[in-house]
Image (spheres, rainbow, N blue to C red):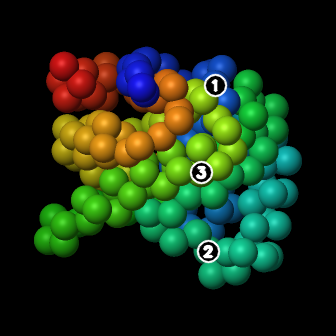
Amino acid sequence: MTTLTLVQGDITDQSVDAIVNAANSSLLGGSGVDGAIHRRGGPAILAECRALRASRYGGGLPTGQAVATTAGDLDARWVIHTVGPVYSPTEDRSALLASCYRRSLQVADELGARTVAFPALSTGVYRWPMEDAARIAVTAVRETRTSVEEVRFVLFDARAHAAFAAVTG
Ligand code: APR
């Protein structure tokens, strides 16, 4: 039985087994969650990302996929990097966004992670409307069979928190 919890705060402050990063396909860092994780997690994370780019993911991590690295100096054992879709008003990319949550939970299961913190994927730089992203996120997590015991959505501000609270009920 997976418990969904909502927290308003900074995902890099969370003490969990795995922290999910809102990455881009390069895996070489960025702003937002990506910037915060690399800044607080330190160079060990980027070193492993570079190694992944030099091996399994030569062409980059595809949208909707997930891969784990060390969590470096963060209070977690792993960072699970996933690449959300950029919002499109004309093309329905919902399945790709749902895939980020499903694949991240599958990677968490492979690792044996029992507590996983997610940000509101794609709702920043990738411009996905918060309410719709929250619906997709909660639905995807609820529909995924996993051994993860706690899925913690870490929302950066009150608006995001309210959007997720409206969906989780
Ligand atoms: N903790 C929790 N949530 C955060 C944090 C943080 N430290 N920083 C930002 N957020 C929130 C944002 O407010 C937004 O709601 O996370 C959500 C996702 O925003 P982004 O980090 O911009 O991620 P995304 O929209 O998926 O865009 C990914 O941005 O940083 C680049 O390299 C990244 O190219 C990739 C793109």
Query: Against 58, is 81 above or below?
Result: above
| Amino acid type, mark 3 | Val
* Residue 39 point in image, percent of width and height: 72, 39
Q: Quadrant of residue 35?
A: top right
| Amino acid type, mark 2 | Gly
Left or right, 49 with respect to 136, comes to right
Between marks 1 and 2 in the image, the one whose residue lies nearer the viewer: 1
Query: Against 122, is 112 above or below?
Result: above
Please name the residue shown 81% across and 32% down the image.
Answer: 73
Please name the residue shown 67% across and 75% down the image.
Answer: 57
Mark 3 and mark 1: Cα distance apart in space: 15 Å
Residue 138 seen in the figure: yes
N-terminal of the pair, mark 3 or mark 1, is: 1
> Is the residue marked by circle 2 packed among few (<14), some (14-19), or many (20+) residues within 10 Å?
some
Q: Mark 1 = which residue?
A: 16
Please name the residue shown 79% across and 76% down the image.
Answer: 54
| Amino acid type, mark 1 | Val
Mark 2 and mark 3: Cα distance apart in space: 17 Å
Q: Mark 2 = which residue?
A: 60
Q: Mark 3 = which residue?
A: 107
Residue 41 seen in the figure: no
Which secondary structure lies at badge 1? loop
Query: Against 164, is 137 above or below?
Result: below
